Image: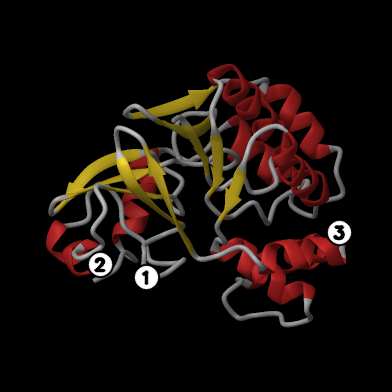
Amino acid sequence: MRVAAIYDIHANLPALEAVLDDIRRAEVDQIVVGGDVLPGPMPRETIARVRALALDVPVQFIQGNGDRETLDWMRGTETAAIPEAYREAMRWVARQLLPEDEYLITNWPQTLRVQISEIGEVLFCHATPRSDTQIFTRLTPEERLLPIFDGLNVPLVVCGHTHMQFERSIGTTRVVNAGSVGMPFEEPGAYWLLLGPDVQLRRTAYDLAGAAQRIRSTAYPQAQEFAARHVLQPPAQQDMLAAFTRVELK
């Protein structure tokens, strides 16, 4: 059995399209969408595309903090979790979505377990098994993470949220971050995982200039910034590791 895990799309439709082309060539048996489909510059089109995945291959979703926040804003609750600088963009994203999109996202679970032959039972979560916002990286001391990952009784946990791929062991549990399809904090490209028979950290190259132009042509309030910062020249991994170290779980 081969499973593709795609996380943190952030409504970057060109990146998602490129990854799905690679996934199609990999002939997977299932796709897991690991949260934070939203927010981002092409929300309606991206939701429609992930909804249509089930026409080609079985697909399961979990909800990320970005999806959860988008639901709140659709319902008129402008939460303090979103900094002032990003609130106009969140309002815009919320206005683009349809009632059926709200219903779809509402029913995504927080975690998911999938049995993958030759790996065993895999736990998919967005940030950690306990929270969709807890931050940890490949550098976070193991002793801080053991209380979170002990007792899960699975050989592998797949997570996202921090937009950087890594693989590490926490106690006896193998933990892999899928990276980000649409907003990587590493070299430009779209990052995802192929699971089965082992774990492959994958990166899909795509037409960055063309994607940036498509994003700039949207009415997304932060389209120019998204194209420049998250498509053409993403933040350096070392810079983001330093930033996350200051806010990671203690």
- Residue receiving disc 2: 148
Q: Secondary structure at mark 2?
A: helix
Instruction: Work out whether 120 lies above or below 125.
Output: above
Q: Position of residue 163 (x, y in %)?
A: 46, 46
Tell me, yes or no, if residue 88 can be seen here: no
**Mark linked to residue 130:** 1
Indicate the amino acid at tag 3. Gln
Image quadrant holding the N terminus, namely top left
Residue marked by disc 3: 96
Q: Nearer the viewer, residue 62 or 89?
A: 62
Query: Decide: marks 2, 1 in contact (CB < 8 A)?
Result: yes
Above or below for 78 versus 28:
below
Q: Earlier in the sequence, mark 3 or mark 2?
A: 3
Indicate which disc, 2 or 1, sits on the residue closer to the N terminus.
Answer: 1
Q: Gap between marks 3 and 2, in whole Å? A: 36 Å
Q: Badge 3, how many Cα within 10 Å: few under 14, some, many 20+?
A: some
Are there few (<14), some (14-19), or many (20+) residues within 10 Å of tag 1? few
Which residue occupies the foreground of this view, 99 or 14? Answer: 99
**Which residue is found at the position 71% from the left and 44% from the top?**
50
What is the spatial separation of the Cα atoms under label 1 and label 3, in whole angstroms? 30 Å
Q: According to the image, what is the colour scheme of the structure?
A: secondary structure
Residue found at x 19% / y 64%? 150
Using the image as rendered, state which of residue 214 and residue 33 is in the foreground: 33
Q: What separation in Å lies between label 2 and label 1 (alpha carbons)?
A: 7 Å
- Horizontally, is 207 left or right of 245 in the view? right
Name which residue type carries label 1: Arg
Q: Earlier in the sequence, mark 1 or mark 3?
A: 3
Q: Amino acid under label 2? A: Ile
In the rendered image, which quarter is residue 30 located in? Answer: top right
